[in-house]
Image (spheres, grey):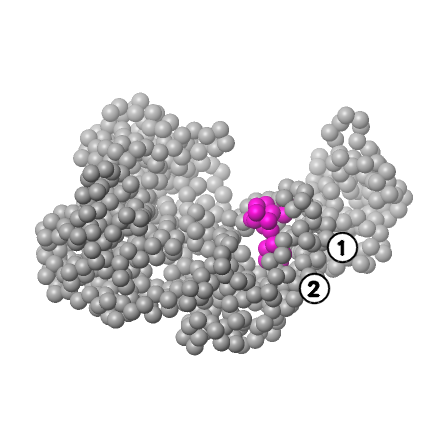
Amino acid sequence: MADARADRTIAKRPPFVHLPGIMRPDILNSYFAEITGLPGIGPKLARPFNRLLGREDGARVLDLLLHLPASTIDRRARPTLSEVVPDTVVTVKIHVDRHVPTPPGSRAPYRVYGHDATGDLTLAFFKAERSWMERLLPIGETRWVSGTVTLYDGMAQMVHPDRVVDAAGLARLPPIEPLYPLVEGLGQGHVRRAIEAALAQVGDLPEWRAEAPDIGFLAALRKVHQPRDALDASPLGPAWQRLAYDELLAGQLALALLRASTVKQAGRPSLGDGAVSARILAALPFSLTGSQTEALKAIRADLGSEDRMLRLLQGDVGSGKTVVALLAAATVIEAGRQAALMAPTEILARQHMKTIAPLAEKAGLTVALLTGREKGRARAELLARLADGAVDLVIGTHALFQEGVDFHDLALAIVDEQHRFGVHQRLALAAKGEAVDVLVMTATPIPRTLVLTYFGDMDSSELREKPAGRQPIDTRAIPTDRIDEIVARLGRALEEGRRAYWICPLVEESETSDLAAAQARFGELQAHFGARVGLVHGKMKGAEKDAAMAAFAAGETQLLVATTVVEVGVDVPEASIIVIEHAERFGLAQLHQLRGRVGRGSEASTCVLLYRRPLGEIARQRLEALRSSEDGFFLAEQDLKLRGEGDVLGTRQSGFPGFRLARLDVHGDLLVQARAEALAAVQNDSDLQGPRGAALRLLLHVFERDVAVKLLSAG
């Protein structure tokens, strides 16, 4: 359990980035010293510590101090053996009765039997040495033992107690002791002793908060690691809250500096005459929704202002972000400039092209597609047309910000699914022109706390309405042992001419995974339905993927077996059924995205969530939430509660910093206050050169918000 907790902790840590040429203040040297300088941590012990702290290149004292407890042991409660609740950590008093050493050549543990007036307890030690055990637990003596009691063959047992002490040793033990996430090779004692040494080595830091809190930074670390009651080491306690606020403040300060750096580079107003936009609107088969109109109004105001635009456009599945993006592009094109739309995958880029090209043609716009697949003469010709201004709007993948791609006059950069890129990639695209306005889009509705956390440097618009005519989707959760029934129903639907997706989580069978694989499921369904079944997954070549998608869109295949490569942007209005296999393994937002592949046409649609029994409590809540609502913003909030921010945004893979200390489900309310303080600090001292600015720079170093530190160093 501890190992699993440690894995989750590491996964959410921010990326550690060495900042070349940026001098770290000397006052932080003791915090950034390697842990091998602490007593008792040699090269052998350093390896598991590096793994625990997510620093394979050498953990620092700071990493250790920010590794906070997962829980505590309260030694003030000392039950009798009859009062012990199995699978809990307890401290009990026993009389040592007898030893049963490990027989030669056996893997059995060394056992020590003891009792109190109410019951018996067996202590088990693996690879124990007899003489050491006899000194630790002398027969006939009384000892206090602390650890987790479990039932083994109906008998109470404690394996490798954390503590074995006599009465004098018990008096010296802290009444409340922290328990830390661990990895193999480390025990609680290793971590506690290392943290104690680390606390003795570091000094206090100047206060960076505008109003000094009741407890300082170092005092808060001491209280969390050396608690006097359980609340001291809890995320709800004042000490942890202080540290969480510091981390949130560092993140908001970094975003405020990024925003100030962007805005202080004056914008170039793009004022269109509305002619191109009018032709696009005339070509649309529907009218804009109210929220589309509002978002467009805000975007055009940004484009026409003297400040550079940095705006987030959130929209639920099928809410019409692409049309808003095209109309935004039309405004800068009317002003004689160019626009670029960057998508995270080739499938999504080509889907945008498919949506935009017919409208652009009717509006008289020149649109081009640039991905890694464009090669040779065709690529060279496209780049030449882009550089001389013959292309009005280019749609592409990360290929757009690579070297050799030059624009005649780029005025608007549109970044789709920003959380799949990093901040640096967005900045790299914006650097392709002069004072480029930036519009970031996401089809994954984001909870408000995460908007502040990850997009706090941006203004925000939301598209909450769905276009007229969208059908509700009948969502059902069905166990996998009824899969034959689902296949039979699917067969009847295909006979009626309907089209369906079948989503699998993996591409091929894995020895380490029991998840259904797309290729295996494709083979089984093809045996049932023959050539009507197609396959698309991320390991296929681009042309193969395109061919599979085109065949499905044209109705040449009716059932498309796919991985989550179809999660966003794929638009086949005729598809009215989606089966999601192992739905319990997907996140709520991702399930909502996948479900959004259907319900796009006039036909009533169905989403089948196939799950494997037994269903865990969180998975059950997730599937229940999806069945009860089609509101992506509501589901995003539920996803945050169930999974945490690292999973909701996919930040583990994206390069966005996660949190070490702050937990948005507990500390989300602190974000608004941290944001206000960060904005005020940057407004009063945009380069952090004043007296308080020096302390705030320390804060940025402590929480390694490298983007902000680099901005400051660049002036």
* Marks 2 and 1, how far apart at CA: 17 Å
Which quarter of the rendered picture does the N terminus lie within? top right
Q: Is residue 655 left or right of residue 189?
A: left
Query: On the image, numbered disc 2 is attached to which residue?
Result: 228
Q: Determine whether the residue tagged by mark 2 lies in a helix, strand or loop.
A: loop
Query: On the image, numbered disc 1 is attached to which residue?
Result: 78
The x and y percentages for residue 7 are 55, 46
Q: Could you say which quadrant of the image residue 439 lies in?
A: bottom left
Residue 472 appears in the picture as rendered: no
Name the residue nearer the viewer: 682 or 146: 682
- Of the residues tagged 2 and 1, which is closer to the observer? 2
- Name, please, the residue furthest toward the right: 140
Name which residue lies at 26% across and 23% down.
Answer: 530
Q: Mark 2 is on which residue type?
A: Arg
Which quarter of the rendered picture does the C terminus lie within? bottom left
Residues in magenta, as a range: 48-68
Residue 193 appears in the picture as rendered: yes
Name which residue lies at 36% across and 45% down.
Answer: 591
The x and y percentages for residue 402 are 31, 48
Q: Are marks 2 and 1 in contact (CB under 8 Å)?
A: no
Q: Is residue 148 magenta?
A: no
Name which residue lies at 72% across and 41% down.
Answer: 159
The x and y percentages for residue 559 are 27, 32
**Residue 302, relative to residue 194: is it above or below?**
below
The x and y percentages for residue 58 are 59, 49
Q: Could you say which quadrant of the image residue 451 lies in?
A: bottom left
